[in-house]
């Protein structure tokens, strides 16, 4: 199994590689991550030793840091797709799992900030599931 993962944004303007292993994979339910994703939670991989290499479009990556907090995100300035970013003065690489084109070969480590989950985010596994768009 290779320790190199490839990823990109939705429009293809940005492409990257991650060399090295991920330390953890968290599903974060905090209100900030829910705002970032527009979903029930963010799904992020964390690494302290893996290296990020921009293959195309590094200049197309925008960064947002929420003033007065440690919360930040990186995204494609064209399509808005979430992209990897360095946090904690470069000590921590955070990679949105959905930005990877390679298969993620590890299961989530844990849910975090579950106490902040949306009031509709419970027992979702009991809902009917469609393989595609419902008819």
Image: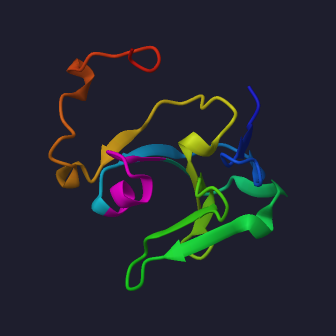
Q: Position of residue 20 (x, y in %)?
A: 72, 45
Q: Is residue 127 above or below residue 97?
A: above
Point 38% across, 85% down: residue: 68
Q: Position of residue 26 (x, y in %)?
A: 42, 45
Q: Quadrant of residue 109?
A: top left
Q: Quadrant of residue 21?
A: top right
Point 74% across, 37% down: residue: 3
Extreme-front residue of the structure: 135
Extreme-bottom residue of the structure: 68
Q: Is residue 100 above or below residue 77?
A: above
Q: Position of residue 123 (x, y in %)?
A: 18, 28
Left or right? Give the position of 37 relative to 23: left
- Colour approach in the figure: rainbow
Q: Is residue 21 visible?
A: yes
Does the stretch in magenta take in 133? no
- Where, quadrant-wise, is the C terminus in this rendering? top left
Q: Which residues are magenta?
A: 32-43
Q: Is residue 111 above or below residue 65?
A: above
Extreme-right residue of the structure: 55
């Amino acid at each position: 199994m290779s320790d190199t993962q490839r990823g990109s944004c939705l429009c293809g303007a940005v492409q990257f590689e991650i060399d090295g292993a991920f330390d953890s994979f968290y599903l974060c339910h905090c209100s900030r991550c829910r705002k970032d994703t527009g979903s029930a939670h963010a799904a992020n991989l964390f690494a302290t030793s893996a290296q990020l290499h921009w293959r195309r479009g590094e200049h197309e990556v925008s960064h947002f840091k929420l003033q007065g907090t440690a919360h930040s995100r990186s995204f494609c300035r064209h399509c808005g797709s979430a992209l990897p970013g360095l946090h904690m003065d470069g000590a921590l690489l955070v990679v949105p799992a959905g930005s990877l084109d390679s298969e993620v070969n590890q299961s989530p480590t844990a849910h975090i900030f579950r106490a902040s989950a949306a009031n509709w985010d419970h027992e979702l596994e009991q809902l009917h599931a469609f393989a595609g768009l419902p008819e």
